[in-house]
Image (cartoon, rainbow, N blue to C red):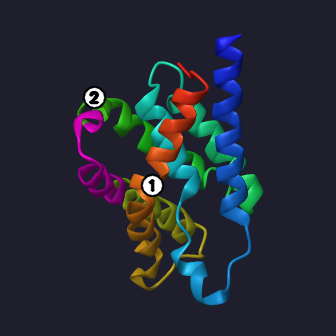
């Protein structure tokens, strides 16, 4: 029962993250939308690397591509690369302070944004300004709060 309960908590947090990625925002705030899907995926890969890995990230990216209507495979590629990097570094990242983790998340979400912009450039829809990197900064600022919230959920529901 514990594994099923844990899987349900993981899936619900990913669904909420997907929902947050499509909630309408005012025009002035659209460039700064945090990458909730990437942050939640990175948290679960870092917290439970034996359960959530590259395959999960790739499937989640495909679902995000469908939900957002973006180029198919764009987010799948970016999330799979990020999951791979976190799988390499998760033991170090767990030892970091929340501020250090936020700095690493800034780099990872920046890489995510660069990969997505690169795929969009291949399809002819790239951004010409560096505003596409703003979500990396906003995501890094929100990381300590999101990581704390997900840690409380993980411990409350005994997700292992």
The residue positioned farthest toward the front in the image shown: 156
**Quarter of the image that includes the N terminus:** top right
Residue 90 location in percent, x, y?
A: 32, 32
Residue 97, placed above or below residue 141? above
Q: Residue at x 40, y 81 (%)?
A: 130
For the point 56% across and 71% down, the residue is 33
Q: Residue at x 44, y 69 (%)?
A: 138
Given residues 20 and 131, the one toward you in this image is: 20
Image quadrant in which you'd find residue 65 = bottom right
Out of 155 and 133, give the one closest to the viewer.
Answer: 155
Question: Residue at (48%, 37%) from the top-left corner?
Answer: 151
**Dot label at residue 91:** 2
Which mark is on residue 87? none
Q: Position of residue 73 (x, y in %)?
A: 63, 50
Q: Earlier in the sequence, mark 1 or mark 2?
A: 2
66 versus 49 height, above or below: below
Q: Residue furthest bottom?
A: 28
Label 2 Cα neighbours within 10 Å, binned few <14 / some 14-19 / many ≥20: few
Q: Which residue is mark 1?
A: 145
Q: Magenta region, mostly helix, strand or loop?
A: helix
Which is nearer the eye, 15 or 78? 15
Q: Is residue 151 above or below residue 107?
A: above
Range covered by the magenta-colored residues = 93-107
Q: CA distance from mark 1 to mark 2?
A: 20 Å
Element at badge 2?
helix
Figure check: 60 above or below 103:
above
């Amino acid at each position: 029962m514990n594994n099923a309960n844990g899987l349900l908590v993981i899936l619900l947090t990913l669904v909420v993250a997907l929902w947050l990625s499509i909630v309408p925002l005012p025009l002035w705030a659209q460039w700064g939308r945090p990458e909730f899907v990437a942050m939640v995926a990175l948290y679960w890969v870092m917290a439970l690397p034996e359960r959530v890995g590259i395959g999960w990230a790739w499937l989640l990216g495909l679902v995000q591509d469908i939900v957002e209507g973006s180029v198919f495979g764009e987010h799948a590629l970016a999330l799979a690369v990020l999951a791979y990097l976190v799988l390499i570094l998760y033991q170090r990242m767990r030892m970091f302070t929340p501020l250090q983790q936020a700095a690493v998340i800034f780099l990872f979400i920046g890489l995510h944004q660069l990969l997505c912009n690169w795929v969009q450039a291949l399809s002819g829809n790239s951004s010409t300004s560096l505003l596409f990197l703003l979500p990396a900064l906003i995501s890094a600022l929100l990381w300590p709060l999101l990581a704390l919230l997900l840690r409380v959920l993980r411990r409350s529901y005994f997700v292992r």
